[in-house]
Image (cartoon, grey):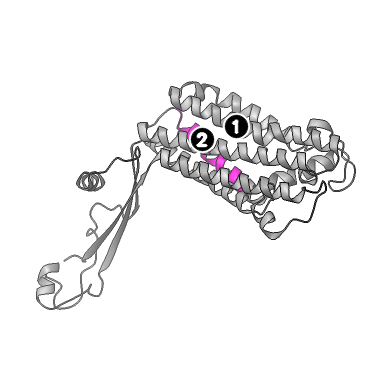
């Protein structure tokens, strides 16, 4: 006599088009940039800085708690999720670069947290304190392109990552390698290169922050635009790579016991010897005392070109396997 198990399986199929994702993200990036540039032009239209209104602060690219910052943090997190999906597949295949994919996923997860919490600003404060400044409105021992001193440890970390991933990038497929290099140039050029130029410009024109005059404000917009564009290109590259080399990813959450009736205690009640259909015919509904439900969630992720259709029967067969 075995305990009855009601196995519930929920199937979720996600179909993603890389081109459609890129189009929507690019439109959002351009929209945020246009609103931010327009707000800066309005603020400095009389030759001096006016007070920032609520909508300017909400959509300004250089504000730490604005909508674009939240969007970029989510974009970084989505890139981390895509890298984690590829790493999971490569791990199952015992690929020699599975550790590189997994490490990239963790790096982008940290970058997402940094974008949301502005951790690099705390690093800059520590650098100023070590350099002899007070980390606030006092003196700053770092000048010129090193005005924003967090770029110094950032460049060191980038050099280490570049050396560690040189062979990894070289072994990528040609199209993927081109996309990764392009996105790297855009992201690093914006986040570090333009930040260094902005620090030099801020000292030349005057002001500690980029948003205190129109040229610096426009440069900050360009910096954030190139970062978001680079992330969009990187996500598009990852989705195309997954479409070609990881076409189907199945995640299962739930009871993986192949024999759920094994080692189960006996049912209680007069109808314990009846099967499920026989119990329902006898007027017994629902699980009896001592029974349980075994749940399983199957998430199937497909990356396909835009306009293609999926055969539902084939998907069902693929999922059941």
Q: Main secondary structure of the magenta part?
A: helix
Which range is magenta?
A: 97-113
Residue 317's tag is: none
Q: Secondary structure at mark 1?
A: helix
Q: Are marks 1 and 2 in contact (CB under 8 Å)?
A: yes
Q: Secondary structure at mark 2?
A: helix
From the viewer's side, name the closer residue of 36 and 170. Answer: 36
Instruction: Locate residue 28 relative to residue 46 in the image: left or right.
Output: left
Gap in Å between the C-alphas at discs 1 and 2? 9 Å
User: Is residue 102 highlighted in magenta?
Assistant: yes
Q: Earlier in the sequence, mark 1 or mark 2?
A: 1
Q: Return the x and y of residue 115 as percentages of the image width and height.
A: 63, 47
Residue 80 in view here: no
Instruction: Locate residue 291 relative to residue 247 in the image: left or right.
Output: left
Query: Label 2: few (<14), some or many (≥20) within 10 Å?
Result: many
Q: Return the x and y of residue 181 as percentages of the image width and height.
A: 54, 26
Residue at image position (67%, 45%) is 37
Please tell me whether residue 177 is drawn above or below residue 210 in the rendered image: above
Please tell me whether residue 145 is drawn above or below residue 15 in the rendered image: above
Which residue position is annotated with label 2? 233
Tell me the quadrant of the picture where the N terminus can be found: bottom left
Which residue position is annotated with label 1? 186
Instruction: Locate residue 173 relative to residue 44 in the image: left or right.
Output: left
Quarter assignment of residue 164:
top right
From the viewer's side, name the closer residue of 185 and 45. Answer: 45
Instruction: Locate residue 64 relative to residue 266 in the image: left or right.
Output: right
Tell me the quadrant of the picture where the C terminus can be found: top left
User: Is residue 99 highlighted in magenta?
Assistant: yes
User: How many tags in the picture?
Assistant: 2
């Amino acid at each position: 006599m075995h305990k009855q198990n009601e196995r519930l399986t929920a199937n979720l199929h996600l179909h993603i088009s890389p081109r459609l994702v890129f189009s929507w993200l690019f439109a959002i990036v351009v929209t945020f940039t246009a609103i931010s540039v327009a707000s800066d032009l309005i603020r400095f239209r009389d030759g001096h800085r006016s007070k920032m209104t609520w909508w300017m602060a909400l959509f300004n690219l250089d504000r730490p708690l604005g909508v674009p910052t939240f969007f970029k943090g989510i974009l970084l997190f989505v890139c981390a999720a895509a890298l984690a999906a590829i790493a999971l597949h490569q791990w199952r295949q015992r690929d020699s670069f599975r550790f590189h994919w997994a490490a990239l996923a963790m790096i982008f997860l940290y970058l997402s947290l940094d974008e949301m919490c502005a951790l690099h600003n705390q690093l800059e404060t520590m650098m100023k304190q070590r350099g002899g400044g007070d980390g606030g409105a006092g003196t700053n021992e770092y000048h010129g392109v090193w005005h924003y001193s967090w770029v110094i440890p950032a460049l060191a970390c980038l050099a280490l990552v570049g050396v560690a991933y040189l062979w990894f990038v070289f072994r990528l497929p040609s199209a993927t390698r081109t996309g990764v290099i392009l996105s790297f140039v855009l992201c690093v050029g914006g986040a570090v290169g333009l930040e260094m130029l902005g620090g030099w410009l801020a000292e030349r024109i005057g002001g500690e922050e980029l948003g205190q005059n129109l040229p610096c404000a426009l440069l900050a917009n360009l910096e954030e635009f190139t970062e978001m564009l680079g992330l969009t290109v990187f996500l598009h590259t990852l989705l195309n790579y997954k479409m070609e080399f990881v076409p189907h990813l199945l995640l299962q959450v739930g009871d993986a016991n192949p024999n759920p009736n094994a080692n189960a205690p006996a049912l209680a009640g007069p109808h314990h010897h009846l099967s499920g259909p026989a119990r329902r015919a006898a007027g017994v509904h629902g699980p009896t005392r001592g029974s349980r439900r075994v749940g399983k969630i199957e998430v199937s992720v497909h990356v396909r070109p835009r306009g293609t259709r999926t055969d539902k029967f084939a998907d069902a067969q693929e999922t059941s396997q």
